[in-house]
């Protein structure tokens, strides 16, 4: 069974891969720290507040992407 931190890192990595966003851009935009992803990859465990910020950031970007795709499909 994976830890919450491992699950969190896997979710962030999956988002980075799917979105093709640079790790430094992600960290800067999500939490104001361009080194955030590097630290995660080196084993840093984020606080719950930081994890909440990151997951909210991901959810907002995914929601925006869905809205853009839906808008293109409208006649």
Image (tube, rainbow, N blue to C red):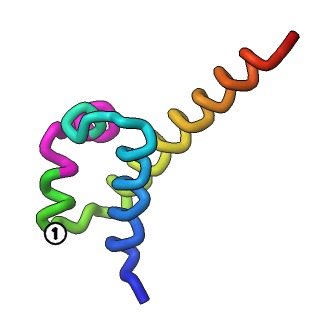
Q: Which residue is at 17% across, 65% downward? A: 44
Residue situated furthest top in the rendering: 75
Check residue 31 for magenta coloring: yes
Q: Which residue is at 43% across, 47% downward? A: 15
Q: Which residue has dot 1 on it? A: 43
Q: Where residue 61 appears, x then y in whole percent?
A: 51, 33
| Viewer can see residue 53 | no
Q: Where residue 38 appears, x then y in whole percent?
A: 14, 52
Describe residue 51's horizontal placement relative to residue 42 as left or right: right
The quarter in which the N terminus is drawn is: bottom left
- Residue 61 vs 15, above or below: the answer is above
Check residue 49 for magenta coloring: no
Q: Quadrant of residue 60?
A: top right
The quarter in which the C terminus is drawn is: top right
Disc 1 packing (10 Å; few <14; some 14–19; many ≥20): few
Q: Main secondary structure of the magenta part?
A: helix
Q: How many numbered marks does the figure carry?
A: 1
- Residue 66 vs 39, above or below: the answer is above
Q: Which residue is at 72% across, 15% downward? A: 72
Q: Which residues are magenta?
A: 27-37
| Secondary element at image label 1 | loop
Describe residue 30's horizontal placement relative to residue 41 as left or right: right
Describe residue 30's horizontal placement relative to residue 27 as left or right: right
Q: Which residue is at 37% across, 46% downward? A: 17
Residue situated furthest bottom in the rendering: 1
Q: Where residue 29 appears, x then y in whole percent?
A: 31, 31
Instruction: Give the camera-side residue of 52 and 44.
Output: 44
């Amino acid at each position: 069974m994976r830890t919450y931190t491992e699950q969190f890192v896997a979710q962030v990595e999956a988002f980075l891969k799917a979105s093709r966003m640079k790790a430094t851009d992600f960290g800067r935009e999500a939490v104001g720290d361009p080194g955030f992803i590097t630290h995660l990859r080196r084993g840093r465990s984020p606080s719950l507040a930081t994890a909440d910020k990151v997951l909210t950031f991901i959810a907002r970007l995914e929601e925006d992407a869905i809205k853009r795709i839906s808008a293109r499909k409208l006649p």
